[in-house]
């Protein structure tokens, strides 16, 4: 049986649901500011469910997001606050903390990608803040080869292992959201040190095809899918809110675990959940992994 790293689930959607606040384009960042301690509580719930990695609530803390609402002076402080909440939740547990770096400008928007030489220093600034406080950098939801290259390059500034995760087409997991083949990531991982490759924030039905391609890169690989019905056209407009996304009602913890166990069957050693996949899903997945004889590490 395999040693499996069990990631946590979604943070932003959990924050919005628990706070009851009206979603804003700042996503989880705004909720974190208005409800101190809620991020820590969610990390604690995922640890209690069996997750062995806490993903910091830093995905959307970018200058371009904060500048829109005159909060850019808090850029550094917000990263440190998110890091503190993850460490407070970890306590004395033998678990790891992954420093999350999400895409610049917007998710699922490869059309907004900046040239590598422009974007990489922006990612490097975040990686340098996160690096001393995390066990690895988790570059999430990259939607094109250019985005993946820029973040893989910039994340090296952390001095920690870099996990590179991409978002794939919900209808064809062989392709990134840009339409480029997932297999083209081979050039990125050949050029920059990457410790693991993953697919995330796409429907679970698309992940098997994506993993088939990631498996060929010769690195540890895995997946953590979302629980959205699809990515709507309205969400692909400027400064959207999560109100534009619809969660699916059929993705029970049992059904999600079925998907994840199939990924493990393909050789994936890193699994977890993304948006709309919560502590109940992770708890059920942990139980299934253990029952199957796998060791959660």
Image (cartoon, rainbow, N blue to C red):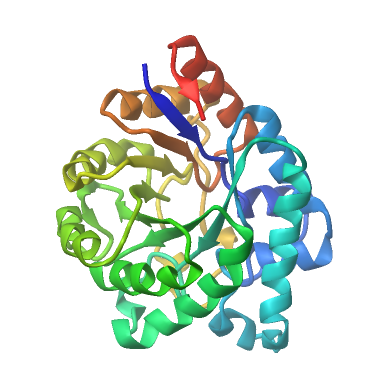
Name the residue rendered at 41%, 37% in the picture: 270
Work out whether residue 187 or residue 209 is closer to the camera in this orientation and state it.
Answer: 187
Name the residue rendered at 26%, 28% in the picture: 266
In the rendered view, would you say 88 is above or below 236? above
Work out whether residue 242 or residue 98 is closer to the camera in this orientation and state it.
Answer: 98
Q: Position of residue 121 (x, y in %)?
A: 43, 83
Q: Position of residue 283 (x, y in %)?
A: 60, 25
Q: Position of residue 90 (x, y in %)?
A: 72, 43
Q: Quadrant of the N terminus?
A: top left
Quarter assignment of residue 154: bottom left
In the rendered view, would you say 146 is above or below 45? below
- Please state if 156 lies on the left or on the right of 136 as rendered: left
- The tally of labels here is 0
Name the residue rendered at 47%, 82% in the picture: 122
- Please state if 176 lies on the left or on the right of 22 as rendered: left
Q: Is residue 58 visible?
A: no
Name the residue rendered at 55%, 52% in the picture: 135
Q: Is residue 183 visible?
A: yes
- Please state if 190 lies on the left or on the right of 65 as rendered: left
């Amino acid at each position: 049986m395999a040693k499996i790293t069990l990631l946590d689930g979604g943070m932003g959607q959990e924050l919005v649901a628990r706070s009851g606040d009206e979603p804003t384009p700042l996503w989880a960042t705004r909720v974190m500011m208005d409800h101190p301690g809620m991020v820590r509580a969610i990390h604690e719930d995922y640890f209690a469910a069996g997750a062995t990695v806490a993903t910091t609530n830093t995905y959307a803390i970018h200058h371009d997001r904060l500048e829109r609402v005159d909060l850019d002076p808090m850029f550094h402080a917000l990263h440190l606050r998110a890091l503190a909440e993850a460490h407070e939740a970890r306590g004395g547990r033998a678990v790891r903390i992954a420093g999350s770096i999400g895409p610049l400008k917007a998710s699922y928007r490869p059309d907004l990608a900046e040239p590598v030489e422009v974007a990489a220093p922006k990612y490097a600034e975040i990686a340098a803040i996160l690096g001393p406080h995390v066990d690895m950098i988790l570059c999430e939801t990259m939607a094109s080869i250019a985005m993946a290259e820029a973040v893989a390059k910039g994340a090296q500034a952390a001095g920690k292992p870099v996990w590179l995760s991409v978002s794939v087409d919900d209808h064809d997991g062989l392709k990134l959201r840009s339409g480029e083949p997932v297999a083209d990531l081979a050039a990125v991982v050949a050029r920059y040190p990457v410790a693991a490759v993953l697919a995330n924030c796409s429907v679970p039905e698309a992940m098997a095809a994506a993993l088939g391609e990631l498996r060929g890169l010769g690195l540890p690989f895995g997946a953590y899918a979302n629980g959205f019905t699809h990515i709507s056209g309205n969400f692909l407009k400027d400064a959207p809110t999560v109100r534009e996304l619809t969660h699916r009602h059929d993705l029970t913890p049992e059904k999600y675990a079925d998907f994840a166990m199939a990924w493990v069957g393909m050789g994936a050693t890193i699994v977890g959940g993304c948006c709309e996949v919560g502590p109940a899903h992770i708890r059920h997945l942990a139980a299934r992994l253990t029952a199957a004889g796998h060791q959660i590490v």
